[in-house]
Image: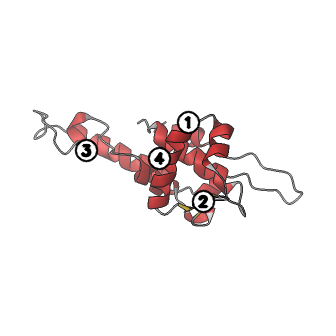
Amino acid sequence: MRLTTMSDYAMRLLMYVGQHPGRLCTISEVARAHDISEAHLTKITHQLALAGWLETVRGKGGGMRLAAKPQHIGLGAVVRSIEPDFNLVECLAQDSSCQLASSCHLTGIINGALQSFMQHLDRYTLADLLEPVAPGGDKVLPLNFHRLASAATA
């Protein structure tokens, strides 16, 4: 399974905004921080706002902030809202013309693997990706989204 770059960038964007609570973040600062095109981030910001993950403020001094607390933003839900489809093989598409569709068991197996992957992501929230502060004020290293996604496919 491979997620699109859009999902990767969406997670980076949410992580950045989540690490800066109490202020509005701009697309240009996130683009600089992650070396991502502002045009890509604009599109992703729009999708995340439509899905209810971000609030955006237009105009001078505008920007974006999380629309919910990090612990209420599920990673599986975010991925579902960003990915265009989950057709891991051609036969999973609605308009499939697979000759084996009536007798093939691959579709069920692939669907099961996809469900396991998504259930794994559903166990985590944006809060799991943010840098928590330990009682002594030291930052705890954040969970790496790429490592999380790789573990789900292993």
Q: Position of residue 111 (x, y in %)?
A: 30, 45
List x then y, in percent, for residue 34.
64, 37
Q: Looking at the image, is 154 positioned above or below residue 130? A: above
Secondary structure beneath dot 3 equals helix
Residue assigned mark 3: 108
**Hey, what amino acid is under mark 2?**
Gly
Which element carries disc 2, helix, strand or loop?
Answer: loop
Residue lying at the far front in this picture: please name it. 60
Secondary element under disc 1, as helix, strand or loop, is loop
Upstream in sequence: badge 1 or badge 3: 1
Query: The residue under label 4 is which amino acid type?
Result: Lys
Where residue 69 appears, as percent x and y from the top left, is 62, 66
| Residue receiving disc 4 | 43
Q: Amino acid at mark 1?
A: Ser
Q: For the point 52% across and 51% down, which residue is it?
A: 45
Q: CA distance from mark 4 to mark 1?
A: 10 Å
- Residue 114 seen by the camera: yes
Instruction: Locate residue 38: give its quadrant.
Output: top right
Q: Residues within 10 Å of mark 2 (few under 14, many from 20)?
A: few
Sequence order check, earlier mark of 4 and 3: 4
Q: Earlier in the sequence, mark 4 or mark 1?
A: 1
Which numbered disc, 1 or 2, marks the residue that appears first in the sequence?
Answer: 1
